[in-house]
Amino acid sequence: MSDDVTPGPDAARAGPGFTLPSRSDGWPDLLGRRPLTPAERAELRRALEAEPGPGSIDTAPDPLFLAYLTIDGPDREGDPRKAMRLRGRILAAARSAAEQRRTTFHATETTVTVGIYGTDAAARIIVLRTALAALITKHGLAARDQPW
């Protein structure tokens, strides 16, 4: 005789249920938001109509620049914990130099590549290189810039 009993479809209804809160219009309130009032909808429409279109000359985005700094040699560190800390310090310096700009970070056994996007990307790579100068010298790493 087995103690494992598979509950049927009626067993699910027998326990305490979960009910969704509902909004004033009868729809379920899944996100905890209230619906827009007609006045808010009209204000949103006016704001969208006032914006220039996507093909407008005034809204043309600035050119997006990308600059890279590649650091070679983290694989020379024999202790895996120290190598991980080294990569972490490089990443922390990259985030600090980027200051809320979009970045890319690609790490392999032998190289760490940090890319920074923006119109001032080359200047931010110089800031990153300066921040990592002591670390690069101490660990015998090689750094090379790759502006694109």
Image: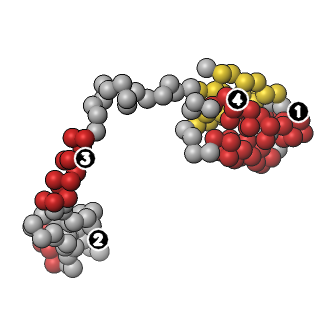
Between circles 3 and 2, the one closer to the viewer is 3
Label 4 vs label 2: CA separation?
Answer: 60 Å
Between circles 4 and 2, the one closer to the viewer is 4
- Is the residue under label 1 in contact with that under label 2 (CB below 8 Å)? no
Label tally: 4
Dot 2 or dot 1: first in sequence order is 2
Dot 3 or dot 1: first in sequence order is 3
Q: Secondary structure at mark 4?
A: strand
Disc 2 crowd rating (10 Å Cα; few below 14, some 14-19, many 20+) is few
Label 3 vs label 2: CA separation?
Answer: 62 Å
The x, y position of residue 112, in whole percent, is 70, 32
Q: In the depicted view, which residue is nearer to us: 11 or 90?
A: 90
Between circles 4 and 1, the one closer to the viewer is 4
The x, y position of residue 138, in whole percent, is 90, 39
Dot 4 or dot 1: first in sequence order is 4
Label 3 vs label 4: CA separation?
Answer: 42 Å
Task: Give the amino acid type for the residue marked by disc 1 in the picture.
Answer: Gly
- Is the residue under label 2 in contact with that under label 3 (CB below 8 Å)? no
Dot 3 or dot 4: first in sequence order is 3
Task: Give the amino acid type for the residue marked by disc 2 in the picture.
Answer: Asp
Disc 3 crowd rating (10 Å Cα; few below 14, some 14-19, many 20+) is few
Label 3 vs label 1: CA separation?
Answer: 56 Å
Label 4 vs label 1: CA separation?
Answer: 16 Å
Q: In the depicted view, which residue is nearer to us: 63 or 141?
A: 63
Mark on residue 140? 1
Q: Which residue is mark 2?
A: 4
Q: Which residue is mark 3?
A: 47
Residue drawn at the location 21% of the way across and 53% of the way down: 43
Whether 17 is drawn above or below 122: the answer is: below
Extreme residue toward the left, this view: 26
